[in-house]
Amino acid sequence: MTSACHRVTVATAQYPIDRLRRFDDFVDKANRWVADAAGRGAELLVFPEYGGMELTSLLPEAVLGDLSAQLEALQPLRDDYLATWTGLARRHAVTLLTPSLPWRVDDDRYVNRAWLITPDGRAAHQDKQIMTRFENDDWGVGPGDGLRLFDTPAGRLGVLICYDCEFPDLARTLVEAGADLLLVPSCTDTLAGYHRVRLSAQARAIEQQVAVVHSPTVGEAPWSPAVDINTGHAAVYTPCDHGFPPDGILIRGDDAPGWQLATLDLPLIRALRERGQVNNFHDWPHQHSRLAQGLQHLDLAADSRGY
């Protein structure tokens, strides 16, 4: 499957963590969300990091408040979870990034895994690369497989899960390899965390002259110690250049859960790397050659009485 050169309509979710009574409640919710976006013409649907944690509401009360026990208890649900999203991608003929979920791997570690599914039901995963202090220190969720580049009907896609987008070299690697779009699913509990991800996503769009699609969890889930508070605004960010908004914000949501839709002209974005007002993508290596000349430290404050 090769990257397509076309315009693509993207739907990015501002997704609430709901308390479910049974697994069918999750299936019904997933059906409503996908049908809504597909019915409005979306070809690529992006869900947030840890949106799958709403499945913990189905667990026994004794497990519900135990971060470690939740990881193990979620695993029997994961195959049906993935099958639900796969069926919806096929039924609605969309490319879909699932909400991520803690996923046990062969060595009994847990990773933060999102699945990218194409309209024909093919699925491949992207694991988070760099873990937050909460994931490392409190939860026991660690990094998994390395970065992947996905050829899909919606374009050539890279996925940077939340904190990953705060590290420029990860984005650079994906765009150098040919990524048309960067998808950034996130889960942040404070405004500070949201703005770190938002500003990093915008910086990556400027640096690499690429569009970035940001999908956060929103709302409160007081019954879940992992995702009890969720803050963010779904958005699509672009370079600040010809044919795009001067502030690089193509669309951004308000406070209500729901989809944000935007149509992206992928060839126009690629053309910016050759004919933009600036040349960020191609000028990236210049910073390394300048740094190779060394840093001069000039002390202009030692003794100013002679001036």
Image (cartoon, helix red, strand yellow):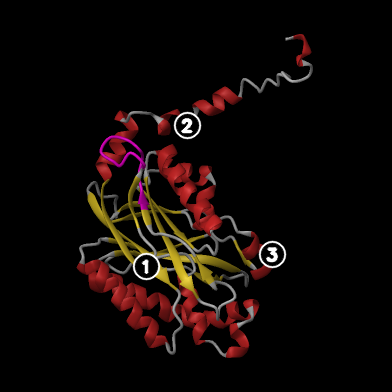
Give the quadrant of residue 306: top right
Residue 285, given in percent of the width and then of the height, sits at: 49, 29
At a point 53% along the width and 65% down the height, the residue shown is 112
Q: Is residue 184 visible?
A: yes
Query: Is 242 left or right of 15, judged from the image as shown?
Result: left
Residue type at mark 3 is Asp
* Helix, strand or loop at mark 3: helix
Q: What's the mark number on residue 29?
A: none
At a point 49% along the width and 69% down the height, the residue shown is 50
Whole-angstrom CA distance, mark 3 to mark 2, is 34 Å
Query: Is 227 left or right of 178, judged from the image as shown?
Result: right
Q: Earlier in the sequence, mark 1 or mark 2?
A: 1
Residue 26, given in percent of the width and then of the height, sits at: 39, 81
Query: Is 94 left or right of 136, judged from the image as shown?
Result: left
At a point 50% along the width and 53% down the height, the residue shown is 195
Q: Which SS does the magenta portion mostly show?
A: loop
At a point 38% along the width and 46% down the height, the residue shown is 179
* Helix, strand or loop at mark 2: loop
For the view shown, which residue lies furthest in the top direction?
Answer: 306
In the depicted structure, whether residue 81 falls above or below residue 128: below
Q: Earlier in the sequence, mark 3 or mark 1?
A: 3
Residue type at mark 1 is Ala
Q: Is residue 153 visible?
A: no
Question: What residue is pinned by disc 1?
Answer: 256
Question: What residue is pinned by disc 3?
Answer: 137
Magenta stretch bounds: 236-247
Whether residue 240 is in magenta: the answer is yes
In the depicted structure, whether residue 179 falls above or below residue 50: above
Give the quadrant of residue 72: bottom right
Quadrant location of the C terminus in the rendered image:
top right
Residue type at mark 2 is Trp
Question: What residue is pinned by disc 2?
Answer: 284
